[in-house]
Image (spheres, rainbow, N blue to C red):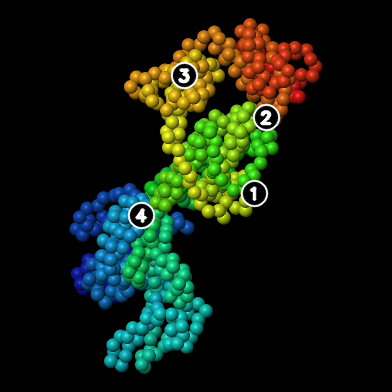
Amino acid sequence: GSPAYGEEDYELAKQNDIPWIMSTDESGIFTIGKWKGENVWEVNKQIAKTLLEEGIALKIEYITHSYPHCHRCNTKLMYRAVPSWFMTKLMYRAVPSWFMNIADQREEMLEQNADISWHPEHIKHGRFERIVQSAPDWNLSRDRFWATPMPVWKGVNKEGEEQIKIVGSYDELEQLSGKRLDDYHMPWIDDVTFEIDEVKYKRIDKVMDSWFEAGSMPFAQFHYPFENVRKFEDNFPSDFIVEYVAQVRAWFYYMHALSVGLFGVNAFKNVIVTGTIAGNDGRKMSKSLGNYTDPNFLMDEYSADALRFLLLESPLLNGEDFTLLDKDVSNIARKLSMIWNVYDFFTLYAEVDKWEWTCKKEDDGIVSKNILDVWILSKIHQLINNVEKTTKEYNLQSATRLFLPFIDELSNWYIRRSRKRFWKSEDDTDKAFAYKTLHFVLVQLSLVMAPFTPFLSEELYRNLTGGESVHLRDWPNGGHVNEQVISEMDSVRRIVNEGLSQRSVAQIKVRQPLRSISINTDDNHVLLETEYEDIIKEELNVKTVTWVSKGKGGDVVLDTKIYDDLRIEGYARELVRSVQNMRKEIGLEVDDRITLYIYTEDIDIQKSIKQFSSYISEETLAVGGIKNDFTEETIKNIREVEVSKTKVKLGIIKI
């Protein structure tokens, strides 16, 4: 259906052997032709069949596909246009338009694209280059009302020749017409006329394509060239711009076309192209479909940082589509919460020891000899360097994905391996280095994560330093990275993981001591260092580490036989775990001392308590040895637990 056809057009079409001409009103009702008075949607199939019967259509096929609907009233959209074959016959119906000459600047646009860094990179010489290569001249004019009027006035001189005047500013228009408007949109602008050399000029009835305004953003935002000339020139081309993939052929293209046309250069130096966010059913997010959770709810439930972090690390930042699911936001929130677990651990023991941060600046001049401190300091510096490198490349997805592995290493390796250094270290110097190292690492983590998790980083930074804001700080400088220590610790962790895997296969808990582990290694292997051996022993709970050179590294053999003496020691470790759990249940502080009561009728467990009394007391902060007399009325906290499937009675009195 096409607009603006009347009965005279219908007759003209017949005279020109044009077999069909129909016209609809805005509601889709035919106003002329064979189906006059019918609705286009109701007679659509009938029209197709008639076309086939009359030999005008060669074939009819039905294809199932999505059809555009009004997003407000959900009714089908109807595109009403004048067919080109009809326009050929009725030339007087041609609609004049204004174009920007793209063909003459196409090669320059392609040349300037070479200076743009695209992420993902394949768009540069792929989608964007193909768009520029095939782009037609840009139709700038529209026959609408709500848009920016084209500043073009026309008149006819005495000789009947058309004259054109393009007005370049409000001031120029005032000089020509003597009028200054409060609003330069239609219909007020249409009343403004002027005369030049006895020729009366009236504005053409056209408005600008809205993409012309969007493409003008780089200079129009500064009201250039009427104001802020220096500000614009100092900030053009822009360093960075980001939008989703559909804007490759829209906003990105139109900015590029205008900037090359006006200034001869590209509009931006770096661009990130994101994908499209889909709802929980895999379809594009839609209010009418209701296929997504309100982002405000997600942020209230899981934090704005979790949602932001998920989107940054997702395929979206690599130009790919991404389905947003609540469970994924929840999962990120859980992983980020490990930072607070580390912070709580730090503050818990710092308060007990009354440790205070005194240097008042992030000084990494930490000269700890503890291999764990050397390792975690190298890891935080490595993180800073890698995040800086990837962000400078505008590869935000890769940058974001660096954080969670580090947080896991900090929480589940450094903290776990250093726990005893904080609460019962016999070396005050080593404990001081442990505090200083962990404080430094957490502060640096708040700085490097600030652009990615702004709220978490702000709170962490203020709590640790008392500073005004992490977002007022400079980007941190990455310090020395001890690559050798990182490599060695990686080897240790691989050995530990293999040993734990063998324990799991043998169904032996880590609390059960084992005799030994044999590791195949080269003669000069760095893991012969005592500190690393101690880590392996403690992590795998083995008595000895044996290094065997067989020309290759990495083979690990765990002796899984449980000897009687090891079984007895295992009972002691089980008892310690049970007492520690009970301490937490009854709300004891980490430094609270206790009187400990343990009673069992099992001979082997009794033997374990006697043999490992000092160990059990030391680990549980029990004072005065282990008692077994439960007749005392002062014992209010009593629990019955199982050790090796045997009932054991525990009692605790806080001192």
Residue indicated by mark 2: 590
Label 1 – label 3 distance at C-alpha: 46 Å
Tell me the mark number nearer the camera, choosing from 4 and 1.
1
Mark 4–mark 1 CB contact (< 8 Å): no
Q: Earlier in the sequence, mark 3 or mark 2?
A: 3
Residue, disc 3: 545
- Which residue occupies 72% across, 14% down? 627
Residue contact between numbered discs 3 and 2, judged by CB atoms under 8 Å: no
What amino acid type should be assigned to the residue bearing mark 2? Answer: Val
Q: Secondary structure at mark 4?
A: strand
Disc 3 marks which amino acid?
Val
- Per the model, the C-alpha gap separating discs 3 and 4 is 52 Å
Q: Is residue 522 above or below residue 223?
A: above
The residue at which mark 1 appears reads as 466
Identified by mark 1, the residue type is: Gly
Task: Please rate how many residues cluster around mark 4, counting C-alpha atoms within 10 Å: few if below 14, some from 14 to 19, many from 20.
Answer: many
Q: CA distance from mark 2 to mark 1?
A: 26 Å
The residue nearer to you, when weighing 85 against 152, is: 152
Number of callouts in the render?
4
Residue 172 coordinates in the image, percent (x, y)? 43, 84
* 277 lies above or below 110: above
Question: Percent x, y for residue 484?
Answer: 42, 35
Q: Residue furthest top?
A: 603
Contact between marks 3 and 4 (CB within 8 A): the answer is no
Q: Is residue 125 visible?
A: yes
387 relative to 617, above or below: below
- Which image quadrant is residue 125 in? bottom left
- Reading the image, the residue beneath label 4 is 118
Type of amino acid at the residue the image marks with label 4: Trp
